[in-house]
Image (cartoon, grey):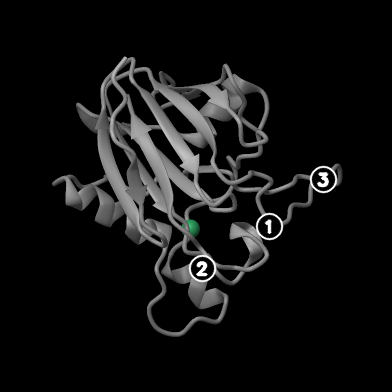
Amino acid sequence: MVHSEVLTIPARKGIAAYAAKGQTIKCINTHGEQVVDTWAFNRNDLTEFMSMEHSRPHLGHIFPKVGDSLRTNNRRPILTIVEDTSGGIHDMLIAACDRYRYELLGVSGHHDNCTDNLAAGMALIGLKAPETPSPLNLFMNIPVRPDGSISFDPPVSTPGSYISLRAEMDVVIAFSACPQDLLPINGKSCRPTEAHFQIF
Ligand SMILES: [Zn+2]
């Protein structure tokens, strides 16, 4: 199998790409502590997209693992996790960050955010997402405690660890290297970094 080049998800920014049914999409946490918001759209109908709320009832758990197929808003499998060396902690609960999130955290003026990054990444290949679906937040560590409370913790992933996803239909895959630098979800140093991906 020919491996494609390794593509960069720039720090704080977004990117989108095509992947054909059966291809593998490998997302690499290059520096180890970067959350990567991830979306997948049906390439032939962008109004069908990977949906966390439609995936959860079929998975029966909220921490996705190898063998799980994420579903679309039409409940069809769109991505299947085939390998994960990152420690298996990913988030299916938290919406993409947006300008309002940062305003509420006290930021005045512009702050990069995953919602804008999705739009910008899609625009780079001439596409427009119909909305900002709730993302699969790769490497994001949101512990859920027995009392139902959650917190925003640093990733458990390590440099170079990765997760591989098989496309179950022709997709547009979009990534955002989350620019959150006010909470420690991208590591205690609160310094967002680049990540990488391959499609092969
Ligand atoms: Zn974000």
Q: CA distance from mark 2 to mark 3?
A: 23 Å
Spatial distance from mark 1 to mark 2, Cα to Cα?
14 Å
Q: Can residue 73 be seen in this snapshot?
A: no
Viewer-side label of 1, 2 = 1
Does the beta carbon of the residue at mark 2 sit less than 8 Å from ligand 1?
yes
25 displayed left or right of 171: right
Q: Residues within 10 Å of mark 2 (few under 14, many from 20)?
A: some
Picture disc at residue 152: 1
CA gap between label 3 and label 1 equals 12 Å
Q: Quadrant of the C terminus?
A: top left
Q: Are marks 1 and 2 in contact (CB under 8 Å)?
A: no
Circle 2 SS class: helix
Q: Secondary structure at mark 3?
A: loop
Residue 12 in the image: above or below residue 47? below
Q: Position of residue 120 (x, y in %)?
A: 26, 56
Q: Quadrant of residue 42?
A: top left
Query: Which is nearer the eye, 166 or 57?
Result: 166
Q: Given the image, on which type of amino acid does mark 1 rest?
A: Phe
* Quadrant for the N terminus in the image: top left
Q: Which residue is mark 2?
A: 101
